[in-house]
Amino acid sequence: MDIDDLRTRILAGERRALARAITLVESGRADHRADALRLLESLKGHGREALRVGLSGTPGVGKSTFIEAFGLMLTAQGLKVAVLAVDPSSARSGGSILGDKTRMERLSRDKGAFIRPSPSQSQLGGVARRTREAIDLCEAAGFDVVLIETVGVGQSETMVAEMSDLFLLLLAPAGGDELQGVKRGIMEMADILLVNKADGELKRQAIRTCADYAGALRLLRKRPQDPEGFPKALPVSALEEEGLQKAWDEMTALADWRRAEGHFAARRAAQARFWFEAEVRDRLLARLAREPLKGAMKTMAGQVENGEISPSAAAEELLRTHLMLE
Amino acid sequence: MDIDDLRTRILAGERRALARAITLVESGRADHRADALRLLESLKGHGREALRVGLSGTPGVGKSTFIEAFGLMLTAQGLKVAVLAVDPSSARSGGSILGDKTRMERLSRDKGAFIRPSPSQSQLGGVARRTREAIDLCEAAGFDVVLIETVGVGQSETMVAEMSDLFLLLLAPAGGDELQGVKRGIMEMADILLVNKADGELKRQAIRTCADYAGALRLLRKRPQDPEGFPKALPVSALEEEGLQKAWDEMTALADWRRAEGHFAARRAAQARFWFEAEVRDRLLARLAREPLKGAMKTMAGQVENGEISPSAAAEELLRTHLMLE
């Protein structure tokens, strides 16, 4: 593969080159992996900085409608918008609920937008690495905004928040004063809560829900990376395209403040550390499933099953003999 | 520490020696750890086999009352009963809800019984190893039945099921025909479901709930380690001490069948393998937090934060340089 050519075309913002590069980083083949690493290395130092926006919301909250309306608003302002999806459910089912471009038909035809469905991977760890690399590629290709979309399932929200400059939660209007069981941990990760469907019959309810969330947010411990008034809860209507500019203004204001205060770079640095440590753990464990450790594990497991050696002693022996640890 | 003396006294069934040995295996000190391993090694080949019974049930289901009534019934039959507790909540809070011997006052005064509260450990992995070792010690001390109790929280049920010959779920009578949201995975681990509180006003409801569970169990895939009719759902009343003998008869019948068919030994072998593999993973990851890897991780994380090297490349480099992997 001509990596130099691919590099040049990505830096020129060529959509097809970007799509091909993402396919490359998603591949599990060893030679593709080597090419992908060469490509990523060669793209370093491009000096471009996209705003990476993580967005989570449960199915039914109007995520696709929101992304389409929000994305079209941004492209109309001349911004280039990439949309990546992280869908943990597709890992198991094989079929991705987020994979369908027809979900965001208008945005997918927009020349300022690039939509990439979720890779169907079996491991969340693998999805994380590939998504991070896809973000880097989009950034190199000159996209101004990279939206990383996920559903609120398991660890995927934490994962997306750990690759975003800003993390948004899209919520539906709640009945009465009950907040929708948003987990405290998720709430604490969010920079902006958007209560969607602030239109028609639900408008009042959405505004009330917004006030409830705003109250809940005030109870949280203030984070150093937030200026006065953040995190915020805002009503939006993806359907009527209301509140989207206001949401974008708040996002850029927050990003600008964080850049000025050094929090923006600090967050990216902390994220890089987080992913480094996660990769060390993942790769270390992955080695257990590969030779020569795989064979050694199997032999020793046989002795453990026969009662020749205890699980603890066997584990210690394995690490000492095969990894020269302790 | 005089390990030989401790060994002799444990084999003689001395309760104080057993308690001291469990304290030893629970200790985090390196010299205690070495003593503990020597002791466990020296106890091998005692030829005794306890019936290890895992028991899970959410708070309020009457677990303590059940264990006390059930334990007293067994000791009255001349059996020696040990009760160990695994309480994941105590790891965080420090205070163990299961630690209080006054919970089972009569049983704790019984000479045929030995009750040990949950160790307050910070890691479930550590709790697992210590509990497995405590089970081994109880078995060596000649206990006929080792009850391992846990609350239905997180991974603790799987952990206890993986150290038990039989795994029981204690449940409360459910309203209507709704089963109490018992997770399918937990249901599939259970050998016998016991619906408690089959007394007074709740008796009818308990019997109905039992029938509902029996129906649900019939829908599960038949497991090779089960004779006809298992897993089973039975009503019990810990309060009125009803159904306990029947439950014990079913337990021993199941254990006898499994022994005769080879499933009993096969399960213990598979469990030993499971714990061996878990220990390898745990210990491998634990090394990352210790020198020399800890220092190497820190240095490299600094370079990752500065953007000198990507998280993936840094992880690969670390494993290659410091663990000689790949």
Image: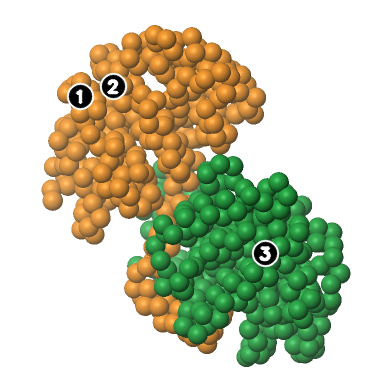
Chain colours: A orange, B green
Tell me which numbered mark, 1 or 2, is placed earlier along the sequence.
Answer: 2
Q: Are marks 1 and 2 in contact (CB under 8 Å)?
A: yes
Residue B66 appears anywhere in the view: no
Residue carrying label 1: A105
Against B83, residue A107 (above or below) is: above
Q: Are marks 2 and 3 in contact (CB under 8 Å)?
A: no
Residue carrying label 3: B243
Nearer to us of marks 3 and 1 is 3
Distance from disc 2 to disc 3, alpha carbons, whole Å, reads: 62 Å
Position of B292 with respect to A158 (left or right) is right
Residue carrying label 2: A68
| B188 or B91: nearer the viewer | B188
Distance from disc 3 to disc 1, alpha carbons, whole Å, reads: 63 Å
Distance from disc 1 to disc 2, alpha carbons, whole Å, reads: 8 Å
Q: Circle 2: is it few (<14), some (14-19), or many (20+) Cα within 10 Å?
A: many
Q: Are marks 3 and 1 in contact (CB under 8 Å)?
A: no
Against A65, residue B317 (above or below) is: below
Query: In percent of the image, x 68 and y 73: which residue is there?
Result: B146
| B101 or A123: nearer the viewer | B101
Query: In percent of the image, x 33 and y 30: which residue is there?
Result: A146
- Secondary structure of residue under mark 1: helix
Against A47, residue B261 (above or below) is: below
Question: What chain does mark 2 sit on?
Answer: A
Q: Circle 3: is it few (<14), some (14-19), or many (20+) Cα within 10 Å?
A: some
Both marks 3 and 1 on one chain:
no
Q: Position of residue B268 (x, y in %)?
A: 53, 77
Q: Amino acid at mark 3?
A: Gly
Q: Amino acid at mark 1?
A: Glu
